Image: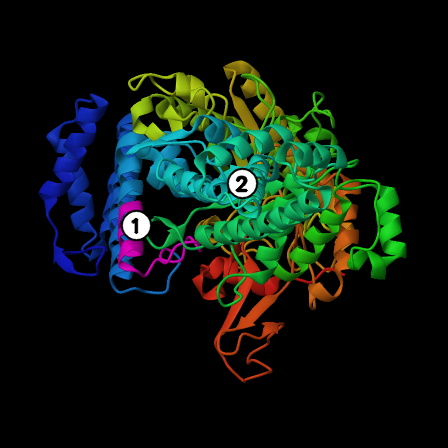
Amino acid sequence: MKVVKRDGKKVNFDANKIICAINKAAIASKEDVSTKFALEVVNKIVDLNKDLKVEEIQDLVEKELMKTYPDMAKNYILYRDMRNIERHKRTTIKKSFDGIVTVEKNDINNENANMAGNTPAGQMMTFASETTKDYTHKYLLNPEYSNAHMAGDIHIHDLDYYPTKTSTCVQYDLQKLFTNGFKSKHGKIREPKSVSTYATLATIIFQTNQNEQHGGQAIPAFDFFMAPGVLKSFRRHLRYRSLTFLDADYIEDKNNELKEIINNSITTISVSEDVKNILAEKLGMDMKTVDKLIKIAYADTKNETHQAMEGFIHNLNTMHSRGGNQVVFSSINYGTDFSAEGRMVIEELFKATEEGLGDSETPVFPIQIFKVKTGISFSEKDFELAVNNWAKAAKGELEFETPNFDLFIRACEVTSKRLFPNFVFLDTPFNFHEKWDINDPDRYLYEVATMGCRTRVFENVRGDKTSIGRGNVSFTSINMPRLAIKARKEAVEKLGENSSELETLAVELFHKNVKEMAYFVASQLKDRFEFQGSAVARQFPFMMENGIWDGGQNLNPNDDVRDTFASGTLGIGFIGGHNAMMALYGEGHGKNDKAYNALYKAVSDIKDIAAEKSKEHKLNFSALATPAEGLSGRFTKIDREKFGTFEGVNDRDYYINSFHVDVKEDISSMEKIKREAPFHELTRGGHITYIELDGEAKKNILAIMKIVRAMQQEGIGYGSINHPVDRCKSCGFKGIIECTCPVCGGKEISRTRRITGYLTGDLDGWNSYKQAEEQDRVKHN
């Protein structure tokens, strides 16, 4: 007889391999198995007198062991499964490497839309990533967690960075870094003296810290942090203009005298008449001259601020911080600094964003997030005034009661053209901070800020509630559709397909499965946290020495970072809420209220378990609405192989993100907001709701304002508005382009879209799962 190997080749049957395998299983089980038994098994196989596949022979051995030595059979089965997993890994990694070498267009090379996977550096990053994941599975992960990940029950994110012990993301306290200066590998950087230097150093901080962590980074109060640089620049410009007027440009004593006078007198770029009088007296000038010099210095400062913001955007879209041409995954939050300096920063940032990059490309980084706060950047009275007098409001000819409502209008206008900024809502109850005070110059410490696709860090069982100096440590996602499929199958087995109680039992089992898996993920996150916490401070010199993670500055080089990382979050994520409801009800939660309530309870249970584990371990566990890029298709593919294809559940190439209504759902923008908003309160580890608009949004800014207002009213925590942003690479035409440019007929079209929470300028760089999802997205009226 012949044995058909897994590659299809036929070899002679070798009885010794069967005897050896049985002996190994006996030793592992500490069983006394006679040679006679092993020979009997061999004879039963030979007596079949036909060619057999390897798996068929193993099945026969397993069957005979179960009859006589059931405990030994269990070890044999476990060993067999382990060997299958190892064999699968080797086959998979070989296939992956082949695809990298030949620069295939596949979902491994295109897993990260922010990386040019086909460049030499991108190839090296992908090689390293695939190899390190394999190492992590073999040597670092608890086998229970490794098997669950490989099987598709869960997804442990950023496995390639697991051995490095680093965190996912962080939010900077730039004021601390600017005021005290900061250390880099080659020396200390002094306090910056101008807004242009402030902006340049902000990009350097982004780029340097990126090498010490694997996720995104955010500036939580960009306007507050840049404002002092504007004031410093204004003082300098006024001093230089004054020296020129006095014909004392190169007289050191006069320069120092003016520097002291101006620095002591000027506390804002909005100079009062009283201060002008003081300057006139001290500088020996008439009021008309002082007023003229201040206006010129103001114009100089505005121009420098614009160049600083332009440079900031250009740098963050061109400074590569990792292999594969990856730029820094950066976010900035702003909108609540109503000082003249803070407002100038945002006004010029908006202009630079509108202008775009060198060929008017839409900047994909930083992710910009506008803070909507009643009393500062929003009020119902101002909204009604703007709506009823839109022509004047659009031209900036109205005066509003809230100091930054005009910036809110500009934010809506800029997002209508460039897809940024997104919007975070500080009035939403779970984003409220009891210490926030409009008169507090440091109120930004008590304002929630978000980053990346949706990572939210605010509540803190280890200290003050704040977004600053903290980040996400790690997160793992639950395959929610699988739990629903399994629940449905179990219910059918118990009751039969036509039982009137089938749906009720299936939902009960689903909720049971969700709870069990949430506990399982919490244990895995705790296990990973302890591994990450065992890192020593010298592994992250920039991040720890400079207190990027608050508290790191107090560590010695060989101190472990556990207590510092303990302020961060551990996210219990999930994906495919809609698909899970399709498995249980045959309809999604976008239209079926029973499905909606079932999904709400499931996510609520995850939140409750996160709270329970936070209290138990004094760590910040949180429920997270996972931003799935490659994962959106990974789970689907595995589930089809395991369970088959179910219509509406796993018959597409992707699962729907987290709690989102199906992208193909015919639903209005207002209804989508209402359906998704309650889930934001549950998923405090991060969330986003987006509205997909048809047509050129820049022609209907008022519609965007109404959508943003609805988000605020309904309790959305973080939201964005999607719409097509196309640009012809040949002639530069911007607008909605179907196949060819309507101006020059060119076919090279840049199509900027939001992939999960961030943008990418070329759909070809997306993996196939997200491309399929983008094609299916329905526009919301």
Q: Nearer the viewer, mark 2 or mark 1?
A: 2
Q: Position of residue 548 (x, y in %)?
A: 44, 28
Q: Nearer the viewer, residue 587 or 48?
A: 587
Element on which disc 1 rests: helix
- Residue 448 appears anywhere in the view: no
Q: Quadrant of residue 735?
A: bottom right
Other-residue count near label 1 (Cα within 10 Å), few / some / many at <14 / 14–19 / ≥20: many
Q: Where 106 falls versus 608 (above or below)?
A: below
Identify the residue at image location x=54%, y=84%.
744
Q: Is residue 224 left or right of residue 556?
A: right
| Residue 2 among magenta residues | no
Q: Which mark is residue 125?
A: 1
The type of residue carrying mark 1 is Met
Q: Position of residue 622 (x, y in %)?
A: 57, 29
Q: Badge 2 is on which residue?
A: 236
Q: Position of residue 375 (x, y in %)?
A: 79, 35
Q: Quadrant of residue 455?
A: top right
Q: Earlier in the sequence, mark 2 or mark 1?
A: 1
Q: Quadrant of residue 37?
A: top left
Boundaries of the magenta span = 108-129
